[in-house]
């Protein structure tokens, strides 16, 4: 088996990984700082080039989906689906438990790129612990 550096779960197992201090000490929020220096269109193109895909069953390209938004819209709402209702998905729960700031940073970048005024993170009702961890990180 080849050795690799984890990306999505890089902070899993790191003590204090749910805290802002630890997240920033490990490079957290650098992506959002970079994104805020770009235009929404530039971010969308970068996401398309990276071929970033959804983590659900369809794996649809995120940049393509964001590019479908009408240019003349007056209001955009972002919904982050952290439900894990598709049988093969099981990343959101672990991410929320161990690295909630990564979810928040991604939400900020997606919201900026799509010019959203409001973002919602949708959780299933059984995710009580994860809700509190994410809520503490937001606060």
Image (cartoon, rainbow, N blue to C red):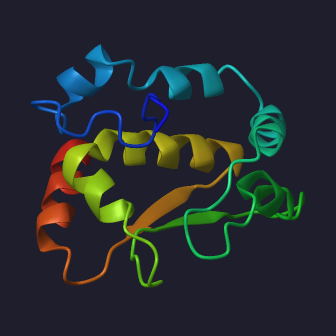
Residue at screen point 28% across, 27% down: 23
Residue at screen point 38% across, 61% down: 91
Does 86 sit left or right of 39 as displayed?
left
Residue 96 to residue 31: above or below: below
Hey, which quadrant is residue 35 in on the image?
A: top right
Hey, which quadrant is residue 139 in on the image?
A: top left
Residue 131 to residue 117: above or below: below
Does 130 sit left or right of 115 as displayed?
left
Where does the image place residue 136, in percent across and percent down from the top left?
Answer: 15, 48
**Looking at this rendering, what residue extends furthest in the right direction?**
71
Let me know if residue 39 appears in the view.
Answer: yes
Where does the image place residue 112, in percent across and percent down from the top left?
Answer: 63, 42
Where does the image place residue 107, in percent across and percent down from the top left?
Answer: 49, 49
Where does the image place residue 14, in percent across and percent down from the top left?
Answer: 17, 31
Residue at screen point 56% across, 71% down: 56
Residue 93 to residue 41: above or below: below
Let me know if residue 139 appears in the view.
Answer: no
How many numbered circles does the render carry?
A: 0
**Looking at this rendering, what residue extends furthest in the front direction?**
1
Residue at screen point 55% across, 63% down: 55
Does 5 sit left or right of 68 as displayed?
left
In depth, the one of 8 and 72 nearer the eye is 8
């Amino acid at each position: 088996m080849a050795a690799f550096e984890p990306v999505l779960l890089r902070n899993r197992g790191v003590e204090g990984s749910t805290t802002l201090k630890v997240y920033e000490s490990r490079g957290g929020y650098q992506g959002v700082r970079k994104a805020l220096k770009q235009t929404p269109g530039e971010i969308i193109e970068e996401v398309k080039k990276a071929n970033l895909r959804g983590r659900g069953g369809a794996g649809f390209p995120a940049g393509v989906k964001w590019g479908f938004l009408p240019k003349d819209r007056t209001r955009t709402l972002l919904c982050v689906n952290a439900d894990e209702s598709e049988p093969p998905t099981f990343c959101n729960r672990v991410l929320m438990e161990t690295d909630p700031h990564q979810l928040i940073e991604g939400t900020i970048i997606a919201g900026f790129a799509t010019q959203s005024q409001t973002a919602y993170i949708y959780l299933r009702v059984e995710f009580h612990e994860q809700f509190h961890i994410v809520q503490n990180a937001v606060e």
